[in-house]
Amino acid sequence: MTAEELKRLYVDFFESKDHKEIPGASLIPENDPTVLFTTAGMHPLVPFLLGEEHPAGSRLVDVQKCIRTGDIDEVGDATHLTFFEMLGNWSLNDYWKREAIAWSYEFLTDERWLGFDPDRLYITLYQGDDQVPADTESAEIWKEMGIPRDRIFFLGREDNWWGPAGKTGPCGPDTEMFIDTGADPCGPDCRPGCSCGKYFEIWNDVFMQYRKTAEGEYEPLSRRNVDTGMGVERTVAMLMGADTVYDIPVFRPVLDGIRKLAGIDEAPDDEALRSMRIIADHIRTAVHILGDDLGVPPSNLDQGYVLRRLIRLAIRHGRRLGIDEPFTHLLAEKAIDAESGGYPELSRNRDFILSEMQAEEERFAKTLRDGMREFEKKLPNLLKNPQKVVPGRIAFRLYDTYGFPVEFTRDLAAEHGLTVDMEGYREAFEKHRELSKKGAEKRFRGGLADDSEMVTRLHTATHLLHQALRTVLGEHVEQRGSNITAKRLRFDFSHPSRMTDEEISQVEDLVNQMIEADLPVRCSQKELDEALEEGAIGLFKDKYGEKVKVYSIGDFSLEICGGPHVDTTGELGHFRIVKEKSSSRGVRRIRAVLE
């Protein structure tokens, strides 16, 4: 079964259970500065999990593309990927545990659907603690499905608890489903969740039945949700009987391309195989970041920094395989061709993907030259060191200042009979990472899940800003992303050149005129085609479902949106643009505040 076949089967199954299919969201979270990328299917649905009504109803099913880099060092093993697809079905205060578990069991084991042997199915559940009891309700339901007690395991919070997304909010236990691969257990304590590979996690149902308070208490929710997730790549691998996720069809064109570029005719050794997998994963992830309609180019900040790191890691592993010529754009073409059927944005943005890949490879080549020159400057003093050791702080400075990978420093050092103090390097790296983490936490505090008064006001102000930009600059202006905290809004939009001082002043004045007019802000639900015919602005219309929420601000603004809004513009205060600058090629960025 291919990934496309699995996705269609999953959607068909839940549509037969009265679910409505909704489109997946962008990889770049819209209006949510709490994360760099969409890491789970729940992120785009946070407002609806918190109680807002979804235009498509209370039973939803979707396919969501995700990126997670927390386990990036594990990429290349049997199961870890940075980009992956998640299948999800959702109950927004509708059905509960019995239906969710019964449908999970049916889809996994029924011959009409995936047809896994029920005797290979193992279950984990939340074991409870002094704050929340064990999830015995789910255990009893699984027993009714035919799962014996010896294949049901109760585990702690680190394994079977979700949330909240922030310090407070909805959260709850989950039940996870594993397939026994038939491998021998790694020891007497081997169980589902063990990393040895015997048990393969395939699905997870989260039951949001509590709210964590600011005092750390867990209160039962009157409005309960079900949030489930099934990994596409892992499930396809299991259905194929494949040993790893890299053995499924979507990776074959890229891996074949790597073999050809590296001249690998026979079975590669373990080290080369891992490098091949890392390249395939990172190229695929980079293609989806660049190819997303909200995609960003490589840079030294935020999403662009992650993208740069992935591309450069792929190049470094290419060098290990003996690929010395530029190659990332060649593999990117294969990745685009393999997945553009399911993700047409990859074809739409093909030229941008390939040009940015080539440009980043050229920049990295310059980085390597600069790093080598700096190393050579330091070499005479390093050779005088009787221990013949390159201090960790120097190795880290080469990396931090020049982007020169420590592996390359080690190779150069070895050529001159030197070693690198890797412990000192790691200490410097960890110190840098902690500082970066604190900066990121400060920078990304807040978000769409924050429905505070100021965030709501700023979110409404983005609608006025968007329309004012279109009025002053022209209708070519389209939103390319936004980021809202309790202190300011950030709005990215398409425009080929820097705004003049006069244009900035005109936009500010127009927004403030609309605020002073105290225009009503009204919400209505419409069919997408009807909304577009009426002139509603939509950020990438193919991401919406058939029915959408449309917010009108007087006769000035009409926009498809799902975020929080004020009742009238008079609540906003005075609008001021703080800064206007370039965000990426053809995209400008405005920071603004309400005073």
Image (cartoon, rainbow, N blue to C red):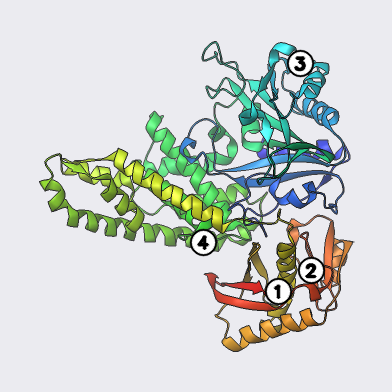
Along the polypeptide, which appears first: circle 4 or circle 1?
4
Query: In terms of secondary structure, where does tag 1 sit?
Result: helix
Distance between mark 3 and mark 1 Cα atoms: 54 Å
Q: Nearer the viewer, mark 4 or mark 3?
A: 3
Along the polypeptide, which appears first: circle 2 or circle 3?
3
Along the polypeptide, which appears first: circle 3 or circle 1?
3
Measuring from the top left, give residue 285's x and y in whole percent. Answer: 54, 48
- Report the residue marked by disc 1: 466
Which label belongs to residue 559?
2
Measuring from the top left, give residue 21's x and y in whole percent. Answer: 81, 46
Residue at image point 83% right, 17% down? 144
Distance between mark 4 and mark 3 Cα atoms: 49 Å
Kind of residue at disc 4: Pro
Along the polypeptide, which appears first: circle 4 or circle 3?
3
Left/right of residue 53 with respect to residue 459 in the rendered view: right
- Report the residue marked by disc 4: 297
Q: Taking 3 as reference, is 533 above or below it?
A: below
Q: Residues within 10 Å of mark 2 (few under 14, many from 20)?
A: many
Kind of residue at disc 3: Ile
Distance between mark 2 and mark 4 Cα atoms: 27 Å
Measuring from the top left, give residue 526's x and y in whole percent. Answer: 89, 62
- Report the residue marked by disc 3: 147
Report the residue that reaches farthest toward the front: 215
Along the polypeptide, which appears first: circle 1 or circle 2?
1
Along the polypeptide, which appears first: circle 2 or circle 4?
4
